[in-house]
Amino acid sequence: MRILFLCVANSARSQMAEGLARHMLGDGAVVASAGSNPTRLNPYAIEAMREKGIDITGHASKSVQDFKAEDFDYVVTLCAEEVCPFLPGSVKRLHWAIDDPASDDPGISPEEMRARFSRARDQIEARLKIFMALQDLPEGPASQEFHASVRVNDLPSSVRFYAWLLNTWPKDWTHRFATFIRPDLNLNFVLLVSDGKQLGGDTLYHLGIEVADRDAVVDAYERARTFGAHVEKPPRSTWRGTPLHELWLRDPDGTLIEIYARMTDADLVAMPADKEPVFLVPGTEPVTA
């Protein structure tokens, strides 16, 4: 991986980003920083990085004109209110707006200046952690529709609000729910009357992704296992309620995710008399005593 961080002076934000990225990404990464108006390495940046056990005293401010876009996979600009440097060429560009911690204001005490640099450093570090989490991301299931169910306290008021927000009337509604469909957005959005139960538990509150068919649900299961996602319920065909082929995952914060495919006429004909779920992957059936 090759990454270049840019700001104006290449004295604070981009220098800290360079030090953090080199430390976090390891020896296999090529990391550099530059500025459109390079000056000198800010002593407060050195101090802030030393608090993390990272030594950037060997860094020096460099001009963006000394670099070529083709030498990098990513160019990350860190300017907030200033005009960011631009490196011409074909490269993936990211923009992380970080307020400049440096200031010539004599009214800012050294303690406050240290706090400003620490805050900028920590914001850059948090963004780098997300950047790292997005690397080597395997391909997910091919979705045809995005579904979300949320609970509301006042169904008429919420229906009015979301009809305005989504610019469409609900497709249908009862005293308990309202369903909005936007095919152009691949959106299926449901409002549910709040039932007082814990979110993400034994309720209809969840997110959902529709895939093409039964085989796509099984494929999503295999992809989820490879990725390391938590499988709440393995893939199965279920005829109770809305007939679906479905897989349930749980995200890192506990929210349920349903990956589903609508049944064909042939699937409906094959419904067992007891309507009990049929598990689609051998060995995933629950063990009963």
Image (cartoon, rainbow, N blue to C red):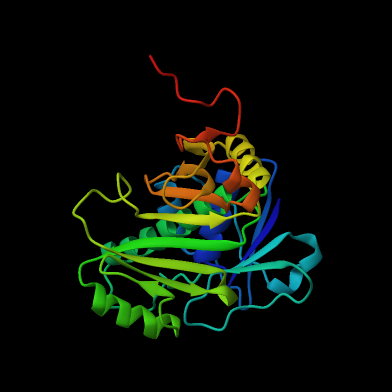
Q: Is residue 244 visible?
A: yes
Above or below, 156 against 10 in this view is below
Above or below, 214 against 177 in this view is above
- In the rendered image, residue 218, in percent from the top left (x then y), is placed at 63, 40
The C terminus: image quadrant: top left
- In the rendered image, residue 250, in percent from the top left (x then y), is placed at 43, 43
Q: Is residue 256 left or right of residue 1?
A: left
Residue drawn at the location 63% of the way across and 36% of the way down: 222
Q: Is residue 112 left or right of residue 223?
A: left
Residue drawn at the location 79% of the way across and 61% of the way down: 71
Q: Is residue 233 left or right of residue 139?
A: left
- In the rendered image, residue 265, in percent from the top left (x then y), is placed at 63, 52
55 or 272: which is nearer to us?
272
129 or 134: which is nearer to us?
134
Residue that protrudes farthest toward the top in the picture: 289
Residue drawn at the location 22% of the way across and 60% of the way down: 194
Q: Is residue 57 visible?
A: no
